[in-house]
Amino acid sequence: MKKILTVLAAALLFAGAASAQEIANFSRGQQVVSPEVTAEGITFRLAADYATVVSLTGNWMTQGEGPVAMTKGQGGVWEVTIPLLEPEIYTYNFIVDGVAVNDPANFKVQRDGTRFLNMVFVPGARSSVYNEAKHRGNLTTLWYDSALLGINRRMVVYTPYGYDDPKNKKVKYPVLYLLHGGGGDEEAWSSMGRAAQILDNLIEQGKAVPMIVVMPNGNPNQQAAPTLGIETSNVNFRDPAYANAYVKSLVTEIVPFIEKQFRAIPKPASRAISGLSMGGGHTLTASQLYPSVFDYICPQSISSQDTPEIRAQLRALKNDGYKLYWFGVGKTDFLYEGALTLDKILTEEGLPHTFFVSEGGHEWKNWRLYLQTFAPLLFK
Amino acid sequence: MKKILTVLAAALLFAGAASAQEIANFSRGQQVVSPEVTAEGITFRLAADYATVVSLTGNWMTQGEGPVAMTKGQGGVWEVTIPLLEPEIYTYNFIVDGVAVNDPANFKVQRDGTRFLNMVFVPGARSSVYNEAKHRGNLTTLWYDSALLGINRRMVVYTPYGYDDPKNKKVKYPVLYLLHGGGGDEEAWSSMGRAAQILDNLIEQGKAVPMIVVMPNGNPNQQAAPTLGIETSNVNFRDPAYANAYVKSLVTEIVPFIEKQFRAIPKPASRAISGLSMGGGHTLTASQLYPSVFDYICPQSISSQDTPEIRAQLRALKNDGYKLYWFGVGKTDFLYEGALTLDKILTEEGLPHTFFVSEGGHEWKNWRLYLQTFAPLLFK
């Protein structure tokens, strides 16, 4: 027995990734391949011998399309093949007898708010920048004290490849502030948004300049992503006294904090701001209330109202000057009409801008597309 | 219609965490509370009206105990209450008609290798340091080029609260190298191990000195955690020519890299090494092959052989000198016997050491306990 234990111990201690950390892990079983992406389509499989009804649901399905039934085959493995999707990252899960289930054969998982979803990656030109590049930057989670919001708050910061190289010790970098939407948090852009991979690839290919990317938490009542389980602020941020409190914190607290902590160029021409949905609203508000801070303004999936106050703010922004005003929206985004309004008032007030209209709607595949589209335009 | 869209848009854009980023997210449904921890016990619940058999499995269950049946109640919600567990973090999942399912009502999830498991937190003295402290350090994922292993490799580095404070600009810190086990990767200690929270709390309470913690990837063929989906090395690390390749990389590549990238004190008295299981093996090997590098040696859940070569290495370590030799093992750990061997040969060779024996086995609740037990002993 002693000998067997020693041999087992040695095998466990010095084996590679195939072994496991807790005894409970030793029996896994699950051997099906899922998902399987081929030129013909994508096959999803789930071993569920005792289940009665199994179906597949994915974020590529249009409203009303609903889950797709899977068929039970040999060995109790349920299966369905769908036509190949356009190159992108999609999320999905199974429904087993009415319960949402992650694919146990696929450990590529994204957190969207409080839900965990499996990813399926369809390769192609558009999605190639979502892969890991050869040269990668670093991601740091760090905390800042917000006097305005009264809490210690978390952000994720990307520094480009070479930032820590001693030979770049004197090099300073421009900064992109990249903001998430409602339901998101400081991890959304580096997880669902593939921001680090997109920047790594674009910088490696010489398409974008090396830059720092700051991804703060945009929910003023939160210290950090809900998964951290730390308490939120009791302040009522809907109280008009706290109007735009987060945007104020972003501009007057986060920007100076970043420019102190990192080798950032502290000039408008080296600051860009972008965000999706709620973060697009933050982008509009920040650029309109603080017209001299950011010279690159790139809201995504955004709607504007047409009011005299907003028009006056846009005129002030025009007078102050900027380098790029770029915004993107999908044709089926429920904010499309409001994006047309933004295009209209920017045009009427004489602010040069690029209005990028894509297929699709209010979804991450568009936000990843927008980031890879406007990032090469920054700081040039 | 336009007005409705505008109102909806405004609500979505400026709402807090309650709203969601993709249209698909708007219908969630799931409203059960699970898990619910009270003084009487822990109740787990799952809404699964169409399921036939639902059970609960958790890492507190002893071998042979198996999943616990749940009972279907009102509204199709299945439920089971177990007696309250000792304060710690436990992992669990449901089994719905034979398929492993995460708890959709609990977004606290740990990745263990390629599996995602829900966490349940039982509060108490022992687990209090797993909560977020008031003052938190930062976590950075960064990459180093290993000439020895021929690949670019990822690690996670913790810097303590205050590290980035300009007033500490000249302060240098000691470093703990903290190694994962088989099946783990560079994210294991900061995720399952709660290393950042444990250090944050111990440092905040004045029990541990501020230190940097370096958590490399210990699988020599891997660039990074499998979730990143990047290729592994084709080198056969079982080839004797590559014996101890990872430990060599750790000592001769990672240590110098860290001491260049961070404000680390580059002295043996300011270097500690610890690891669990396979990482405990790496700790033994590193301390025995490089006796003058680390003055604090803390293997966890570890087994040693008794050979003349190992005894000679231990004598060399003794002659070189060290500050602390601390190792921990659980009474039911399958490596317990091998840990007794280590205790015996350390004693016989005259190396002062602490042999910490806990309840339990080869499991994360012990490794979290060991870290919070030995961290206060480091660098003092």
Image (cartoon, coloured by chain):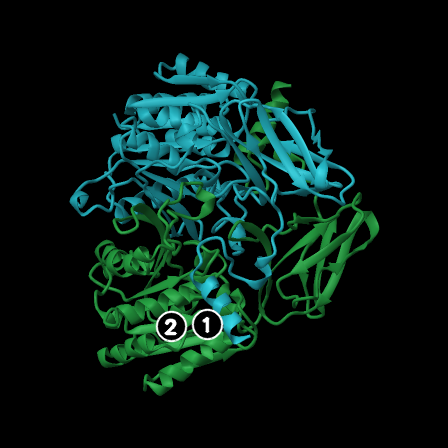
Chain colours: A green, B cyan
- B253 shown above or below A239: above
**Do the residues under discs 2 and 1 have CB atoms within 8 angstroms?**
yes
* Numbered circles on residues, count: 2
| A236 or B196: nearer the viewer | A236
Q: Which mark is residue A324?
A: none
Q: Residue at x 66, y 66 (%)?
A: A61
Left or right side of A362 for A241:
left
Q: Residue A370 carries which label?
A: 1
Q: Which residue is drawn at 44% across and 72% down?
A: A303
Name the element at disc 1. helix
State which quarter of the image contains the N terminus of chain B.
Answer: bottom right
> In the image, residue B23 lies at what x, y percent?
57, 63
Real-space Cα distance between discs 2 and 1?
Answer: 9 Å
| A117 or A225: nearer the viewer | A225
Left or right side of B257 for A94:
right
Q: Residue at x 45, y 61 (%)?
A: A181
Residue identifier under label 2: A298
> In the image, residue A272 lies at what x, y percent?
32, 69
